[in-house]
Image: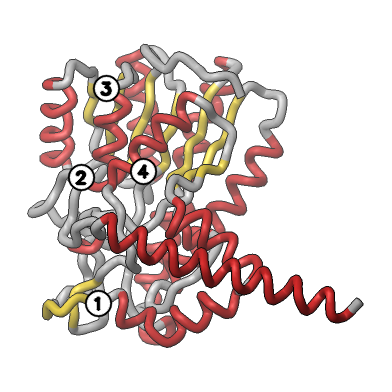
Amino acid sequence: MKRQDVKGQVAIVTGASSGVGWQSAVRLAEAGVRLCVTARTAQALERLRDEVLQRGGECLVVPGDVTVQEDVERVVRECLAHYGRVDVLVNNAGVQSYGLFDALPWEHITRVLDVNCLGFMRFARGVLPHFRRQGRGHVLNVQSMLSRGGAPLLSAYTASKHATLGWAKALRLELEGTGIEVSNILVPSVDTNMFAHAPTLLSRAPAPVPPTYDVDVVARSVVAAVRRPGRTRVPVFLQGRLILALDAVAPWVGQFLLGHFGARMQQRDEPVERREGNLFQPMTRSYGPHGPVPPTPRWKRYSATAGLAALAGGVVLGVAGLARAAR
């Protein structure tokens, strides 16, 4: 795909009140993209607009909930009225709920699926008629490494991400030849406020599966995807391309590690009582790109990379040796 000039394009960014959405909006504005940002928390969006304006960008704020069809239609309508066009949809809004599957309240499960999966679909249906009339457009889905894997305590979130990636693949096939592109970004654990917002049935605060990356890694990948659409991007190596490769040759490694230690990995030594979190009402006390768990130091990531790479190499050599012995 030829590199596109993104300056002057118009992008709707959902879930822009914190984390990946916030930082992606900032990076897109720096690249010259005109923004329409949406989330449930108007105050946070106003602060984001202030930052974008300080950096010389353009930003329209339209609060809304991705689970409410009228809100979705209003965001698209106001963006078109303000800018006269939409070029990119950055589907990013997402929620989690921590707990064992059979202990999660059913309304938590359905809400996670509604936000993470149906929310993406609602916004895509909202912009696709305009994209078709325009003869071009781009649906960019901020996915997760859990779109291809799994983690304990996050069954509903994992299900929503698998479903959304499958939908995106089918949508891309349907749009072949129309000039409308579909891209996906498989996001690793990043330092967002999701871990300060997510409800949990446990007694300790949620934490990302280590290692944790700076949210700007994903934001830069979003900009790269807007410039070169139509791909599924994996922006990091250790908790990205290496994990996918290792899972292909030795899936038992991830099964063992997450099966035995995954639940403990996802809890901080900090007591918490947060059974509802931001599932049904936004939490306004925290906003911005970064969250309560800082990025893992590089030396730790490099050490883990070397260890996993050695393990993967040993597995490949072992499989090759068995194949030779069988001949």
Query: Any mark on residue 218, and which?
Result: 4
The answer to whether 9 is drawn above or below residue 213 in the figure is above
The answer to whether 64 is drawn above or below residue 200 in the figure is: above
Dot 3 corresponds to which residue? 30
In the rendered image, residue 227, in percent from the top left (x then y), is placed at 47, 24
Between 173 and 68, the one nearer to me in the picture: 173
Distance from the alpha carbon under mark 4 to that under mark 2: 11 Å
Q: CA distance from mark 2 to mark 3?
A: 15 Å
* Mark-to-mark CA distance, 1 and 4: 23 Å
Residue 94, label in figure = none
x and y, in percent, of residue 74 in the image: 34, 32
Labels 4 and 3 touching (C-beta < 8 A): no
The residue sitting at 38% across, 26% down in the picture is 11
SS class, disc 4 = helix
Whether residue 137 is visible = yes
Q: Residue at x 40, y 72 (%)?
A: 154
Pointer 1 residue: 267
